[in-house]
Image: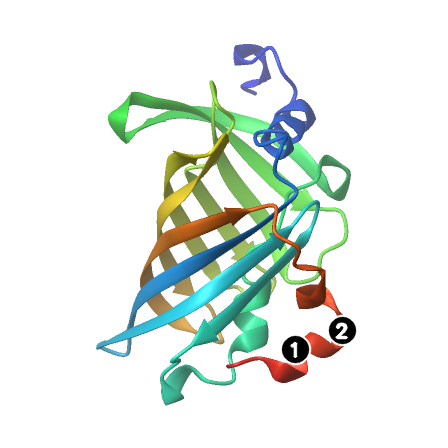
């Protein structure tokens, strides 16, 4: 419907997202999290590890008792990447977000549905970063992610993220700040199968 407004196809836009930071292969970043859950403010810290193209892991420390046991949930909440070959994608519109950021809106339907039923991505037309993502899960749940970005070394990366989660497993809001990025660390050990047994969560 809106494809005529873009010189690129939806698949080409997804490929552009993957190529935003060409020098980045892995990263490690500290997380400061303030979650609102059942009327309580629950602060905790963590570390996020990313290995391109599709590995993502979050280790949380100081997790309140009420949220313990959610390790798998947090690690599966958001895909590490949206690869064109994994989705049927369509440009469904355009929207100008705050600060006059012009975005394509993509609808993604997984070719193999597991946890995610569909996703909407807001993709900046100039930089191809994703300031807004809305996920619909197969259990009927919804999660909304809003991100602000900054430049670290030669990479465009999140500075802060606002999350609203409404799923059968968890209903919460969170504000996440990203601190002390390490670009291209050796993190292979973090993705070995036995590493989950040693998690701090």
Residue 137 image position (x, y, % from top left): 56, 60
Callouts 2 and 1 close, C-beta under 8 Å: yes
Residue 197 image position (x, y, % from top left): 66, 83
Residue at (67% x, 23% y) in the render: 12
Asked if residue 135 is positioned above or below residue 1 in the image, the reply reads below
Residue at (70% x, 61% y) in the render: 114
- Crowding at dot 1, Cα within 10 Å, few <14 / some 14-19 / many 20+, comes out as some
Residue 29 image position (x, y, % from top left): 47, 55
**Gap in angstroms between the C-alphas marked 2 and 1:** 7 Å
Whether residue 139 appears in this view of the structure is no
Residue under pointer 2? 193
Asked if residue 58 is positioned above or below residue 170 in the image, the reply reads above
The picture quadrant where one finds residue 149 is top left
Secondary structure state at the residue bearing disc 2: helix
Would residue 53 be found to the left or right of residue 59 on screen?
right
Residue under pointer 1? 196
Residue 74 image position (x, y, % from top left): 52, 68
Q: Residue furthest bottom?
A: 65
Residue placed most toward the observer, 42 or 141: 42
Residue at (35% x, 69% y) in the render: 172
Residue placed most toward the observer, 169 or 48: 48
The picture quadrant where one finds residue 83 is top right
Residue placed most toward the observer, 198 or 41: 198
Res. 95 mark: none
């Amino acid at each position: 419907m809106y494809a005529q407004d873009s010189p690129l196809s939806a698949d080409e836009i997804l490929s552009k997202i993957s190529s935003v930071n060409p020098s980045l292969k892995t990263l490690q970043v500290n997380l400061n999290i303030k979650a609102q859950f059942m009327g309580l403010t629950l602060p905790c810290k963590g570390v996020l590890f990313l290995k391109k193209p599709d590995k993502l892991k979050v280790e949380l420390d100081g997790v309140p008792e009420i949220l313990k046991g959610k390790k798998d949930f947090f690690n599966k909440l958001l895909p590490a990447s949206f690869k064109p070959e994994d989705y049927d994608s369509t440009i469904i519109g355009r929207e100008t977000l705050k600060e006059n950021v012009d975005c394509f809106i993509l609808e993604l339907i997984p070719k193999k549905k597991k946890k995610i039923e569909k996703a909407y991505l807001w993709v900046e037309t100039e930089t191809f970063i994703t300031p807004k993502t809305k996920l619909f899960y197969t259990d009927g749940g919804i999660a909304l992610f809003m991100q602000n970005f900054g430049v670290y070394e030669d990479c465009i990366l999140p500075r802060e993220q606002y999350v609203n989660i409404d799923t059968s497993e968890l209903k919460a809001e969170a504000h996440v700040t990203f601190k002390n990025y390490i670009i291209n660390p050796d993190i292979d050990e973090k993705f070995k199968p036995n590493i989950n047994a040693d998690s701090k969560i």
